[in-house]
Amino acid sequence: MLNAGAGRRDLIVTLAGRVVSAFGDEVALVALTLRLQGDGAQPYEVGLLLAAGVIPLLLTARLVGRLVDSRDSRHLLVGAGIVETACTIPLVFLHSVVPIVLLVAALGAAASVSSATWSALVPRVVGEEHIAGAVSAQQSLSALVMVGAPAVGGLLAGTFGPGLPLAIDAATFVAVTLAAAAVRTRRAPAAQPGAGEPGGVRGGFEVLRADRVVAPLMAGAALVVLLVGMVDVVLVFLVRQTLHAGGVWFGVAEAAWMAGMVAGSVAAGRPGTDRARTRATILGMGVVCAALVPFAVVPDVWMLLPLSVIGGAANGSAVTCLSALLVSRTPEHERGRVSAAANAVFGGAQGISLLAGGAVAAVLSPRGVYAVAGLLGVAAVVVVGIIDAARASGRVRAESPDPAASPVS
């Protein structure tokens, strides 16, 4: 993939560190979810826990974007890793909802820094011509590792209690901090071409809004995330209360979704044009939503597995194609701000959806939440597809020669 040995080494170290951290995060999330549910928590409390990890992405977006584009990448990654480790250790011992939520929120704030920094650093590591392949490799490896993480989290929490999975998560943050320190490629502050423009340097949200391809796609994807994210709150209740299955089945259902993401992420490395990636993103979002609808009617827990694989494959494809679009269409000196803004858009949508899911779950059954989220999501994707087709058609007409201006032969 890479021409230089140093770049190949840094990519391996980067991917390994992020994959280990993703594994620990998923194991810990399953453990915390099971802990709250086992302690008698209500759906809105589970929703609050899940939202706490993503809401900081929205609240800190502008600050994080400026930090990533103005500070040394190694300093940011190591500092964020230390904070994440320090926040995870107390979770091993806590059972009260309030301190758990506060610590998870602090973790989310630190993760927003590390995520945006890694996203901006990877193109520097691999080179511009290898961005799509690097994004595909990162997404597929993360999904591959997390195939087993939910099941491992459910098994460990069920056998030894939630403390051990949370301790493992703390250890993974130590590993990713060491990996960040070992990466030789650094993204240091540099003079930014936009600094002399009227109004100063553009913020990440301004960059996204100015892109005619990305802007409508981001809006549609955020709406889908908002609708579909509600089901995360009720999956544990669907598995354990509606379908009367154990905690391991909850982890297995999560793992099946991630297994699908592996295939979807790998396949998404193939589309080589912006138009192909845009279409793949829209198609993937539509299949994700459609795959959720049957969750509302399945009579046995095992039937969740093939549906999860299909939905996960579509999810992996959509996420990878959209991520590659964002990176490839953004100037290098603005990638930190754009990454932070994109994280804020999707983190904010996910956080709102989790809170909404907890509220909706107080009125609807888990099956009802799946039906509403899936059907409304499909409708939203249809609208996005129509808007994108109209945009593409308008562009084609604008680029077509005017017959009236052609010379008469």
Image: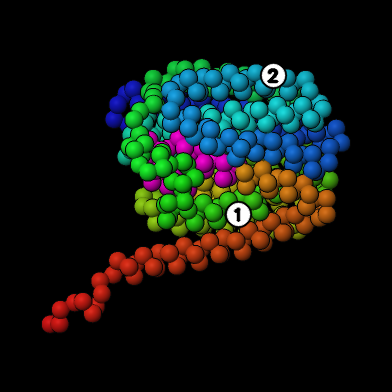
Element under label 2?
helix
Q: Quadrant of the C terminus?
A: bottom left
Q: Residue furthest front?
A: 198
289 lies above or below 264: below
Q: Describe residue 50's horizontal placement relative to residue 281 as left or right.
A: right
The amino acid type, in three-letter code, at marker 1 is Leu
Residue 326 is a magenta residue: yes
Residue placed under numbered mark 1 in the picture: 223
**What segment is highlighted magenta in the picture?**
320-347
Residue pictured at 69% horizontal, 56% vertical: 373
Q: Residue furthest bottom?
A: 409
The amino acid type, in three-letter code, at marker 2 is Ile
Residue 186 is a magenta residue: no
- For disc 1, the neighbor class at 10 Å (few under 14, some 14 to 19, many from 20) is many
In this rendering, which labeled residue sits more in front, label 1 or label 2? 1
Task: Report x, y in % for residue 291.
Answer: 63, 56
Residue placed under numbered mark 2 in the picture: 89
Q: Earlier in the sequence, mark 1 or mark 2?
A: 2
Task: Report x, y in % for residue 384.
Answer: 53, 61
Q: Describe residue 45's horizontal placement relative to residue 271 as left or right.
A: right
> Quarter of the image holding residue 34?
top right
User: Quick check: can you spot residue 4?
Assistant: yes
Between 33 and 244, the one nearer to me in the picture: 33
Task: Report x, y in % for residue 363.
Answer: 83, 54
Residue pictured at 44% horizontal, 25% vertical: 71
